[in-house]
Amino acid sequence: MDISIDTLIEQSGTPVSLPEVFRKINRLTQDPNSSMADISQITEKDIGLSSRLLQIVNSPYFGFPSSINSIARAITIIGTHDLRDLLLTTTTVDLLANKEHKQTNIRQLWKHSLYCAVISKLLAESLQQEHTECYFVSGLLHDVGRFILFRGIPETTHSAINHACDNGQDLLNIERSLLGYTHTDIGRRIAEHWKLPERVIETIAYHHQPELAQHYPLETAIIHIANHIANSFENEDESAENNTSRINPYAWKTSGLAMENINEVLNKVPEQFNELYDLLLPAVQAA
C-alpha cells in the first residue's frame, strides 16, 4: 500500500497538534522562570480540563487523605511535571477516544494501553523512580501508532493482525512489508508533531526494540516489559510466565527488574486498572 505516514495521520482524522492549553502548560513546566501560579492560572481557564484533573487527583488511584479542591493545591502536592503528565493523559485520551470509532479492536487496544500504563507506573515505583506519571503516559501512548492505523486504514490493519496471529509472525515485519513502516514509526511521528517530552517519544519508538533507545534506555525497557505483562490480563490463555519469557533480555538487564518485582506488581494491577478505566475512558465504554 502506497501511503505516507503523514497522509495516513491526516486520513485518520488525528489532530497533528495538541490543544493550545496543553502547549502553554508544557512550555511553562520547562521554563525555570515560570511559577506554580502561572501554571494553575492557565489550567483553570479550561473548566472542563481542570475539573477532570481534580477528579483524577481525588480518585482512589492517588489515595490522598484529604480532598484537593484547586489546581494550585494539586500542583503543590504532586508537582508541576506530574501535573503536566496528567494533563497529557487527559488531553490525548480526549483526542483518541472518538465515539465515531466503535471498532472492537480499538476498545481492546484502549484496554491494553491502560494495562500497560498502570503496569509501567507500578514497575517504576518498585524501582523507586521519580515522576512516575511519565511512565504512565509512556505506557498509555506506546501504541498510539496503532490507533492511527485502525482509524486510517482499518481493513489493512485487521488483515495484518490476523496474519500475524494465524502465522506466528512478527507484527512489525508484516506492517513494514505492507506499508514500508510500522506502528512505532507512526507513533514517533505523531508524538513529534505533538511535541511530547523526548522520553515519551523514545519509548513509543523503541518499545519493541529497547536496545535501540539511546537517551532513555531504562524508561524504554520498562515500557517494553509492561507491554508484555499487559497481555496476561487481556488474554486468559496467556500466563504471566509465558509472556515474561518473551521479554528482551536487554530489557531485563537494563531495568534491573526481577520476577519478584513482577509478582508484586501483578497483585496491584486489577484494582488500579478498574479505577482508571471508569475514570479516564467513559467514551470508550459508551462506544
Image: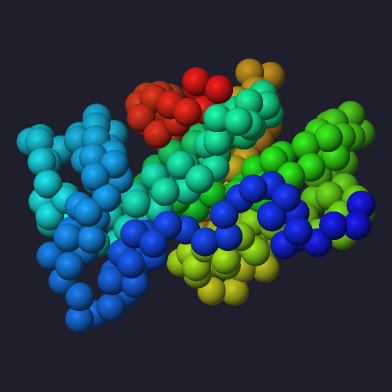
Q: Residue at x 43, y 26 (%)?
A: 282
The answer to which quarter of the image holds residue 184 is bottom right
Image vertical order of residue 88 relative to residue 160, above or below: below
- Specify whether residue 111 is in view: yes
Q: Residue at x 46, y 66 (%)?
A: 197
What count of labels does the image hold?
0
Q: Position of residue 234 (x, y in %)?
A: 60, 25
Q: Position of residue 218 (x, y in %)?
A: 50, 62
In depth, the one of 195 and 176 nearer the eye is: 195
In the displayed structure, does residue 2 sit left or right of residue 206?
A: right
Q: Which part of the image, by quadrant, shows the C terminus?
A: top right
In the displayed structure, does residue 137 sit left or right of residue 224?
A: left
Q: Residue at x 40, y 53 (%)?
A: 88
- Specify whether residue 256 is in view: no
Q: How is the image coloured?
A: rainbow
Q: Position of residue 150 (x, y in %)?
A: 71, 39
In depth, the one of 248 and 185 nearer the eye is: 185
Image vertical order of residue 124 relative to residue 62, above or below: below
Of all residues, the one furthest to the left in this rendering is 66
In depth, the one of 214 and 1 nearer the eye is: 1
Q: Residue at x 74, y 44 (%)?
A: 152
The answer to which quarter of the image holds residue 280 is top left
Q: Position of residue 15 (x, y in %)?
A: 57, 54
In the displayed structure, does residue 273 sit left or right of residue 147?
A: left
Image vertical order of residue 159 relative to residue 76, above or below: above
